[in-house]
């Protein structure tokens, strides 16, 4: 197998969640050395041990992405342990599923801090080391909530913000040979985002996707792998939906089904 990340050092935040785990295993198979970070209760230690046991290279660190001083510690650890940094996956994220009318200010601020400010701090603190390392790639994990409306006010605003910040960062860091892109997943199975939803959450999601199924963490990891690798060398400032066609035309697809249903009822 061609190792598409051989010689690269990759930092993944929120690494012990559904998508982070898939990325960590896939990137290790592709030769990356990994810096895996997560909140104090997130099992990033066992994840790093599992990768090391399979012959990979990985360290685990506790990190709240909202804390600027912890970013400095994490970047120093990457430099000390692996000698540099080439890829940042701003993957950590949180959701509270509250409308504008319902959201409390603490929840609003926490969501914005994790999803938007955390990613900004990540870019600010990793870019200088990536520059020293010869350049790199940043992948900001936004959402379909960053492409259209959503039912969580803070989540929607934070993911739209991240999409815009990605384009700004792509231009700011272009002279440092750092590419910056956003991905926009929708309805990915095996993540806490789905396990914790209301009854009917997952099923209604599935039924609104033109492909009629949810995506998998591995499918997301493969997209991030591509953007992280040199194969994506001319791609920067792009936004890529990974959602089974939902953002392209989920509404018109549902409307077509409704039209057929109404026509059948009229017969
Ligand atoms: N699952 C989906 O369908 C979906 C859809 C669109 C976007 N996303 C985005 O994908 C990313 C990955 O989420 P996932 O699907 O793997 O869900 P997940 O909940 O399984 O993983 C998210 C991880 O981020 C960690 N995290 C939360 N706050 C943090 C903080 N302050 N500092 C560090 N880590 C923190 C969590 O502990 C968790 O391990 C998130 O940014 C999420 O918004 C997910």
Image: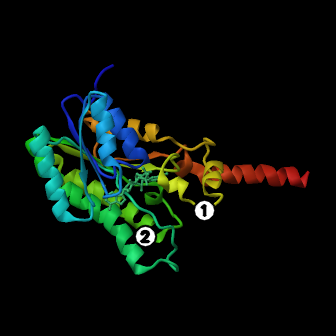
Q: Which residue sits at x=37%, y=48%?
A: 16
Rendering quadrant holding ligand 1: bottom left
**Residue 130 seen from this side:** no
Q: Nearer the viewer, residue 37 or 251?
A: 37
Q: Would residue 265 be seen by someone viewing this image from the given angle?
A: yes
Residue 98 image position (x, y, % from top left): 51, 72
> In the rendered view, does 102 fall on the left or right side of 107?
right
Using the numbered discs, state the Cα–Cα distance from disc 2 to disc 1 in whole angstroms.
Answer: 18 Å
- Tell which of 117 and 14 is nearer to you: 14
**As drawn, is 44 to the left or to the right of 7?**
right
Bin the neighbour count of mark 2 within 10 Å (Cα to Cα): few under 14, some 14-19, many 20 and up.
Answer: many
Q: Would the CB of label 1 be found within 8 Å of ligand 1?
A: no
**Residue sitting farthest toward the top:** 1
* Colouring mode (rainbow / by chain / secondary structure / one colour): rainbow
Circle 2 sits on which residue? 154
Is 57 situated above or below 40? above
Determine the image quadrant of residue 167.
bottom left
Residue at 45 percent across and 47 percent down: it is 241
Q: Position of residue 38 (x, y in %)?
A: 31, 54
Badge 1 element: loop
For the residue carrying disc 1, how many other residues have a C-alpha within 10 Å: few (<14), some (14-19), or many (20+)? few
Tell me the residue that label 1 is attached to.
198
**Residue 200 located left or right of residue 123:** right
Q: Does mark 2's beta carbon lie closer than 8 Å to ligand 1?
A: no
Tell me: residue 2, above or below residue 88. above
């Amino acid at each position: 197998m061609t190792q598409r990340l051989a010689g690269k050092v990759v930092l993944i935040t929120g690494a012990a969640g559904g998508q982070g785990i898939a990325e960590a295993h896939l990137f290790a198979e592709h030769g990356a050395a990994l810096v895996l970070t997560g909140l104090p209760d997130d099992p990033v230690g066992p994840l790093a041990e599992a990768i090391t046991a399979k012959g990979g290279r990985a360290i685990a660190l506790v990190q709240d992405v909202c804390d600027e001083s912890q970013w400095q510690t994490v970047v120093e650890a990457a430099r000390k342990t692996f000698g540099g940094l080439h890829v940042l996956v701003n993957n950590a994220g949180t959701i509270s599923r509250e409308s504008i009318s319902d959201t409390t200010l603490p929840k609003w601020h926490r969501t914005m801090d994790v999803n938007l400010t955390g990613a900004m701090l990540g870019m600010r603190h990793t870019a200088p080391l990536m520059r020293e390392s010869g350049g790199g790639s940043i992948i900001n994990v936004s959402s379909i909530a960053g492409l259209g409306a959503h039912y969580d006010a803070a989540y929607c605003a934070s993911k739209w913000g991240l999409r815009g910040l990605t384009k700004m960062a792509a231009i700011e860091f272009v002279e440092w040979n750092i590419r910056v892109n956003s991905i926009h997943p929708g309805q990915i199975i095996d993540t806490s985002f789905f396990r914790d939803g209301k009854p009917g959450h997952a099923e209604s999601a599935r039924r609104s996707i033109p492909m009629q199924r949810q995506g998998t963490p591995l499918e997301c990891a493969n997209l991030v792998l591509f953007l992280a690798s040199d194969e994506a060398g001319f791609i920067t400032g792009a936004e890529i939906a990974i959602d089974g066609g939902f953002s392209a035309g989920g509404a018109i697809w549902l409307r077509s089904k409704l039209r057929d249903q109404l026509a059948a009822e009229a017969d």
